[in-house]
Image (cartoon, grey):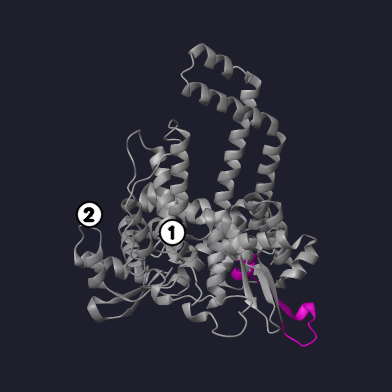
């Protein structure tokens, strides 16, 4: 892991889990796998605190454990999983877009708790939705349960690995750590539950005698002792499936920008047909026939089979090669080249960054090198139609920033400069890695700036929260308008202005974090796709 990734992971762990978990997590990221006692010794923390921190990290899939040959259990941090915290708002917003408020809260609860049983999620979400409803209305468990089933059917949530039932040894000592296994067959199978009931509001019953409340509490404790029907079947958010969805959206958007809305709708249909059958890291989608695509088009698209075939031919002949033809059966078999699409998206991102940092003339040279692969200094000047002095300055500027590379091809074994060709080229993978590193640094800087802004105005924020709490309690008891006005005036006009500025700055920083994460996603997807294939 690079220093920028370690720093960003450390900031994210501190913000979401506190200092103790951050210390243990960052220590494991830096040192690699270690047994429990060595972690406690190196981190200089009590064994009990280390255990609790590891429990939290394992619960959120940020630390894995494995049994060593000597019988010790070794714990290892998953830095890439820690960095996914940055994308939590995007996962939650996507769930809201696809499955409304219920889907949003299901995904939010699973991300907040790491792993949960379906019955616990359904009850918690129903209670939260009931809180937001008008008085007298409640959310039924069955509605939340149906949304959960839809999320599992489309693979947005999946079962956690579990210990096999027959793992307990009949004789001899128990193993130091259970071996968890993924059952591929049951990964998205929802247990058959009959969850009946409705969401409850908090503080719904303020009255009543003391004896009644005691009896109620005793009944609740008795109920809680009964194991739920899906006890032991835990669920987690399938992050790879969300990434697949983001990638598909980016491809559809790129096709819409390059061609038109109808082309993008055809590509969207192809991606939707193969989203569950194609693995998230596959280089191609499953081959689809023209007839299948025609039958699966959305109802509102009244285009004939002939026009669809023309669009598919246009897409297959396009130089970007997002869509490829793999056969003639069924009116023609078509696939989407996902690896090629990611490479095009990453290249477009690199071009955009070069244009923003170095200007349009440098972007022209960069595009020229991408097209021609290798060029000498003189050729660049001629093709780009830029004066020699300016072209040299631009090339050295991009070379010093590692955007372009210089390749030496000697005519003789002695590598004499006078008998050597110097060719400029773009190593897209190396440039993408370098820019990814810069993106991680940028996000870390943004988080530190946000923390600094809130720390500087902590006193004012606490005062604002106190005033809001007093106002809320007075409104609940039916206070007069004059009294409320008096409480509001506790915050002066300059303080109110300062609060507005703080809110605006924090919102800007949050928006910037999300925008940089979109760039990180495209570059990361391209790097992973290239390394695998």
Asked if residue 391 shows in the view, the reply is no
Q: What's drawn in magenta, residue-wise?
A: 410-433
Q: Position of residue 451 (x, y in %)?
A: 68, 43
Residue at 50% in and 71% down: 161
Relative depth, front residue between 213 and 184: 213
Instruction: Determine which quarter of the picture holds residue 107.
Output: bottom left
Q: Which secondary structure lies at badge 1? A: loop
Which residue is under mark 1? 226
- Residue 495 is inside the magenta segment: no
Which residue is under mark 2? 300
Distance from disc 2 to disc 1, alpha carbons, whole Å, reads 50 Å
Screen quadrant of the N terminus: bottom right
Give the mark nearer the N terminus: 2 vs 1.
1
* Label 1, residues with CA under 10 Å away: few <14, some 14-19, many ≥20: few
Q: Which secondary structure lies at badge 2? A: loop
Relative depth, front residue between 96 and 272: 96
């Amino acid at each position: 892991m690079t220093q920028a990734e370690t720093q960003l992971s450390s900031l994210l762990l501190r913000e979401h889990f506190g200092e103790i978990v951050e210390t243990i997590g960052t220590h494991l990221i830096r040192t690699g796998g270690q047994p429990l006692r060595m972690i406690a010794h190196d981190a200089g923390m009590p064994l009990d605190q280390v255990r609790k921190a590891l429990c939290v990290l394992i619960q959120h899939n940020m630390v894995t454990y494995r049994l060593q040959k000597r019988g010790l259990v070794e714990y290892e941090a998953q830095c890439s999983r820690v960095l996914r915290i940055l994308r939590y708002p995007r996962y939650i917003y996507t769930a809201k877009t696809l499955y409304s408020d219920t889907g949003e809260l299901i995904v939010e609860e699973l991300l907040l708790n790491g792993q949960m049983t379906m019955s616990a999620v359904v009850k918690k979400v129903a209670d939260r939705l009931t809180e937001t409803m008008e008085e007298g209305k409640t959310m039924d468990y069955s509605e939340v349960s149906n949304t959960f089933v839809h999320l599992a059917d489309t693979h947005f949530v999946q079962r956690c690995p579990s210990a096999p039932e027959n793992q307990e040894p009949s004789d001899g000592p128990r193993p130091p750590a259970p071996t968890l296994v993924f059952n591929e067959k049951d990964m998205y199978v929802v247990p058959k539950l009959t969850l009946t009931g409705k969401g409850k509001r908090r503080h719904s019953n303020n009255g009543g005698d003391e004896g009644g409340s005691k009896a109620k509490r005793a009944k609740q404790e008795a109920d809680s002792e009964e194991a739920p029907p899906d006890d032991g079947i835990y669920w987690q958010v399938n992050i790879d499936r969300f990434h697949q969805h983001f990638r598909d959206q980016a491809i559809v958007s790129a096709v819409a920008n390059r061609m038109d809305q109808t082309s993008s709708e055809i590509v969207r249909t192809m991606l939707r047909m193969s989203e569950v059958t194609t693995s998230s890291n596959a280089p191609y989608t499953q081959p689809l026939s023209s007839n299948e695509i025609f039958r699966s088009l959305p109802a509102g698209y009244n285009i004939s089979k002939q026009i669809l075939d023309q669009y598919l031919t246009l897409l297959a002949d396009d130089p970007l090669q997002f869509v490829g033809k793999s056969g003639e059966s069924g009116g023609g078999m078509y696939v989407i080249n996902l690896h090629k699409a990611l490479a095009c998206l990453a290249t477009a991102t690199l071009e955009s960054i070069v244009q923003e940092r170095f200007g349009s003339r440098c972007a022209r040279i960069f595009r020229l090198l991408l097209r021609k692969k290798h060029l000498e200094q003189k050729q660049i000047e001629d093709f780009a139609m830029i004066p020699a002095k300016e072209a040299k300055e631009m090339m050295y500027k991009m070379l010093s920033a590692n955007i372009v590379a210089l390749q030496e091809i000697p005519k003789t074994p002695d590598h004499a400069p006078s008998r050597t060709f110097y060719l400029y080229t773009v190593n897209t993978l190396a440039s993408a890695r370098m820019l990814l590193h810069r993106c991680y640094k940028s996000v870390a800087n943004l988080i530190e700036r946000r923390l600094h802004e809130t720390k500087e105005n902590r006193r004012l924020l606490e005062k604002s929260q106190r005033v809001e709490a007093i106002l809320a309690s007075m409104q609940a008891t039916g206070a007069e308008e004059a009294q409320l006005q008096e409480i509001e005036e506790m915050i002066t006009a300059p303080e109110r202005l300062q609060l507005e500025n703080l809110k605006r700055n924090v919102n800007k920083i949050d928006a910037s974090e999300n925008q940089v994460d979109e760039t990180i996603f495209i570059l990361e997807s391209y790097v992973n796709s290239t390394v695998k294939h």
